[in-house]
């Protein structure tokens, strides 16, 4: 009669299996979070490259937009970008910006800066890139605010030195350069 006895798992065996699963989860979860963060960063850099390519195409094909790109632009600030242990300092002119929030508001997300002087460029870039929302996927600035604004900028107010930046939109100031040469602290 002792041969017919069914045997299950002991309590100790179940606890060991649960502990092993817990250790594996503790190892995997931070790795997965890191992969998600990297994919969001790469998505933003890819979107910045697409915007940059569109800007360069508009500037190459449209002389009026090219002139409008730098005309009477006084929206500037001085930035310092780390460059091989030293900082590269230059004037950064914000040509126009666009809402990059994840939510879907009722307004159309258009490139603009409110200046009549840059209107030809803004119209050309809106026609070329369209008005669909391009959300900023990386979520936090160094101040803890959500990054939610794209910026088309010109280094030293030159249409030959276009840069794409993102910021938290709190004061319409670019915070991180994404294209070209993504800032290393955008991680």
Image: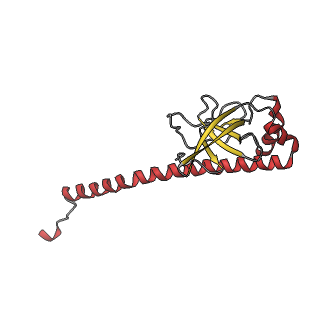
Q: Give the answer, above or below, for where 6 lies relative to 83.
A: below
Question: Where residue 124 sits in the image (x, y, percent)?
Answer: 82, 41
Question: Where residue 81 sits in the image (x, y, percent)?
Answer: 59, 44
127 and 76: which one is in front?
76
Residue lying at 68% horizontally and 38% vertically, measured from the top left: 92
* Residue 1 in view, yes or no: no
Residue lying at 68% horizontally and 50% vertically, measured from the top left: 49
* Residue 108 in view, yes or no: yes
What is the quadrant of residue 68 in the picture? top right
134 and 167: which one is in front?
167
What is the quadrant of residue 115 in the picture? top right
Q: As drawn, is 47 to the left or to the right of 38?
A: right
Image quarter in which the N terminus is found: bottom left
| Residue reaching furthest to the left | 1
129 and 105: which one is in front?
129
Q: Give the answer, above or below, for where 118 lies relative to 15.
A: above
Q: As drawn, is 108 to the left or to the right of 43?
A: right
Q: How many marks?
A: 0
Residue lying at 15% horizontally and 71% vertically, measured from the top left: 3
Q: Give the answer, above or below, for where 38 lies relative to 73.
A: below
Q: Give the answer, above or below, for where 121 lies relative to 171.
A: below
Question: Where residue 186 sits in the image (x, y, percent)?
Answer: 54, 45
Q: As drawn, is 171 to the left or to the right of 72?
A: left
């Amino acid at each position: 009669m002792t041969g017919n006895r069914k045997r299950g798992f002991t309590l100790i065996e179940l606890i060991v299996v649960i502990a092993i699963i817990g250790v594996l989860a503790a190892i995997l979860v931070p790795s997965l979070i890191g992969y998600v963060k990297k994919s969001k960063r790469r998505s933003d850099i890819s979107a910045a490259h697409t915007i940059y390519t569109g800007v360069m195409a508009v500037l190459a094909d449209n002389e009026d937009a090219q002139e409008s790109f730098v005309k009477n632009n006084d929206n500037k600030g001085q930035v310092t970008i780390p460059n091989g242990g030293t900082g590269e300092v230059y004037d950064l002119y914000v040509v126009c910006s666009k809402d990059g929030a994840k939510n879907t508001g009722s307004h159309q997300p258009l490139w603009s800066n409110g200046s009549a002087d840059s209107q030809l460029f803004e119209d050309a870039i809106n026609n070329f890139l369209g008005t669909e929302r391009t959300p900023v996927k990386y979520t936090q600035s160094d101040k803890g605010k959500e990054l939610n604004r794209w910026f088309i900028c010109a280094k030293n107010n030159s249409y030959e030195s276009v840069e794409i930046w993102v910021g938290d939109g709190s004061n319409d100031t670019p915070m991180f350069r994404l294209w070209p040469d993504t800032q290393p602290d955008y991680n």
